[in-house]
Amino acid sequence: DAGVIQSPRHEVTEMGQEVTLRCKPISGHDYLFWYRQTMMRGLELLIYFNNNVPIDDSGMPEDRFSAKMPNASFSTLKIQPSEPRDSAVYFCASSFGGGGRSIYFGEGSWLTVV
Amino acid sequence: GENVEQHPSTLSVQEGDSAVIKCTYSDSASNYFPWYKQELGKRPQLIIDIRSNVGEKKDQRIAVTLNKTAKHFSLHITETQPEDSAVYFCAASGGYQKVTFGTGTKLQVIP
């Protein structure tokens, strides 16, 4: 398996623009997670899905952030409008089963908002 | 919710020495404790994990211990090598399928 695939790997955008990050989980995995990593806040769970259904979005910072999972092989994280403080590495991860199962991370999307 | 605290935040050891990273958790329902290694510019990768029905687990130079009563668990790396230099994250999860990560320990192995 190719692992969790994320795109884009790097993005630089101007404040106010819409940003869409994409993720393809490992085939057969039923949980998908979106994390944000910064030096200040470490690894933060933003939202996770089980069988394409959002289970917990309490980590989503504000209404500017939204996530969807239209099918088992694709998810998006959207930021609209983007702000400089959104600059971070965004990781998508997936697992077969939830707690008690290994989580596999994608390579991350490095976002810079200027 | 679960809260995971990790210490130390940075750790420097001489090559060949041992390194120990400690974590505590708050939710007694947590029953799975993975450790991840993240090299600079790379993704976190699982290196070892332990479940609540086990007190210790070893994999070559890496071992994890778990004390459920005290709600703490530790990562032990023996005979450290320069390639062990990375950020290490502990994590805890339980019945809510939500994995909570510690804040990370930056380990530097000095040749």
Image (spheres, grey):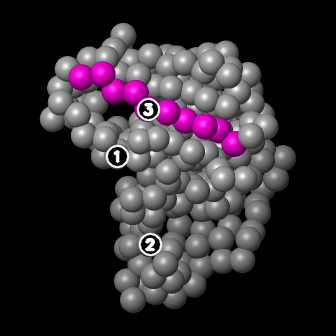
Q: Find numbered disc 2 in the image and state the secondary structure of the residue it sits on.
A: loop
- In the image, residue B51 lies at what x, y percent? 77, 47
Residue located 40% across and 27% down the image: A20
Q: What chain does badge 2 belong to?
A: B
Q: Which residue is mark 3?
A: A21
The majority secondary structure of the magenta stretch comes to strand
**Amino acid type of the residue that numbered disc 1 sits on in the rendered structure:** His
| Dot 2 crowding, Cα within 10 Å, few <14, some 14–19, many 20+ | many
Residue B4 vertical position relative to residue B38 in the rendered view, above or below: above
Q: Say if mark 1 contacts mark 3, CB within 8 Å.
A: no
- Kindly report the distance in space between the C-alpha atoms of the residues bearing marks 2 and 3: 30 Å
Kindly tell me whether residue B4 is visible in this rendering: no
Residue B47 image-quadrant placement: bottom right
Q: Which residue is mark 2?
A: B85
Residue B9 vertical position relative to residue A30 in the rendered view, above or below: below
Precedes in sequence: disc 1 or disc 3: 1
Q: Is residue B52 left or right of residue B88?
A: right
Q: Which residue is mark 1?
A: A10
Residue located 45% across and 58% down the image: B42
In magenta, the rendered stretch is A17-26
Q: Find numbered disc 1 in the image and state the secondary structure of the residue it sits on.
A: strand
- In the image, residue B3 lies at what x, y percent? 52, 33
